[in-house]
Amino acid sequence: MNTFMTEPIGQLKIKMKELGADDAGIVSIDSPLIADQREDILKIYPQTKALISFVIALNIHAIQTRNKPIMNYEAKNGLDRLHEASFKISRYFNDNGAAALSAAPAFPMDMTKWAGKIWDISHKPIAVAAGLGTIGINRCVLHPKYGTFILLGTILINTEFKDYDKPLEKEVCIHCYLCVKNCPARALSKEGIDFLGCLNNSYRYFMPGFIDLVKDMAESKTVKKFEKKWPDDEILQMWQSLTYEGYYNCGYCISVCPAHLGKNYNKLEYEKEFDLPIKHDQEKTYIIGKNNKKELPQRILPLTCKQAIEFAFLFFKRENAKGIDAVIQYNITGKETGNWHAIIKGQTCIVKNGVAKNPTLTIDAPSHIWLKISRKEKNAILAYIFRQFKAKGDKKLLRRLTSIF
């Protein structure tokens, strides 16, 4: 029997704190709370029997500053501390008879899966299952002590434990909606998050911006035309992000969050102290299709039909889906065969595998046709008229699809 199976979980967590974690939790691979993560986890390490989720606390004051270089410097230092703690915790278990490995907290990711799920491990649901916090309106894990000012790490281990942590009973988010009010990209709302809106603004100097830089450079016939799209400061921001460390353009949904203070904080004094709401007029924001000063073309596109359907929620435009309560069934044939259905309700979209009962609209399409429609390379209505795919059910909904996704 492995020694860790008899060791109290409290003692293990004390040890992990000694090794650099600010908090930690353990969850079984068989936990129903991470059932949707199980397949991806076992692909990485088939021997996984448990996962250790741990937290590194950031310097709150460094993140709350309006100075973006300082905010990014603290994030980098936090990642360095996370890497070190991850190594020490894994080494501790390995030296004591178990096999443990740490998953990348962020980069590197599998870019061959772009624009789909390029990350291997979804740290947030694992942390929630391990009792380290709950998901806030800003879609971050909120820790009961450190609030949103944390970084997450995950370790996969081939041993079982005597007992496991349980998720928190009380929600940490206090629903102040300061993250919504202070989002420069207007990517957050009470209904959810506009994933691409957040990605394009916050990660401007990561993947989305780099793709734009290369394509704009190739498409520009003269230096002057290129400079209209890429002024020197933006080129240097990209250079800095590539040579020093990934540079986040925005982190306001984190910096304004008062969850660490609890529900009894003084909202008026808090907003006054940090001069909220944040004024965005003096900084550049990068938004797709929202009539912003720096409006961008849509260049984050699915590469496969499977991506186009399974990640449809990423391309979902909530503002165009008001009043829609429907189920769309996709039956795909050809090179990529499969059945999926999208559930649209309350301006949200969830995609599931399989065949739905009594769908509002059923689409039967070859994979190469639906991929082109999803990438806006083919007009859906014309493709339907010319019988390149079949549809039955609510034809009005069919006509609205191109505005919803």
Image: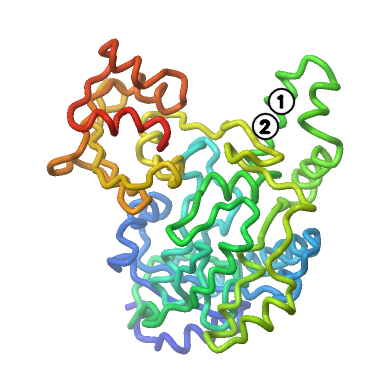
Determine whether 12 is above or below 136 in the image: below
Residue 400 percent coordinates (x, y): 35, 32
Q: Name which quarter of the figure residue 332 lies in.
A: top left
> Which quadrant is home to the C terminus?
top left
- How many numbered discs sit on the rendered protein? 2
Callout 1 amino acid: Asp
Residue 329 percent coordinates (x, y): 23, 36
**184 or 365, which is in the foreground?**
184
Callout 2 amino acid: Asp
Element marked by disc 2: helix
Q: Residue at x 41, y 21 (%)?
A: 372
Checking the image for residue 155, the label placed there is none
Residue 51 percent coordinates (x, y): 42, 68
State the CA–CA distance, disc 2 to disc 1: 6 Å
Element marked by disc 1: helix
Determine whether 383 is above or below 319 in the image: above
Checking the image for residue 212, the label placed there is 2
Q: Residue at x 63, y 75 (%)?
A: 57
Q: Residue at x 50, y 69 (%)?
A: 141
> Which residue bears the numbered disc 1?
216
**144 or 77, which is in the foreground?**
144
**383 or 209, which is in the foreground?**
383
Q: Is residue 387 left or right of residue 22?
A: left
User: Disc 2, disc 1: CB below 8 Å?
Assistant: yes
Q: Name which quarter of the figure residue 163 lies in.
A: bottom left
Q: Is residue 336 left or right of residue 180?
A: left
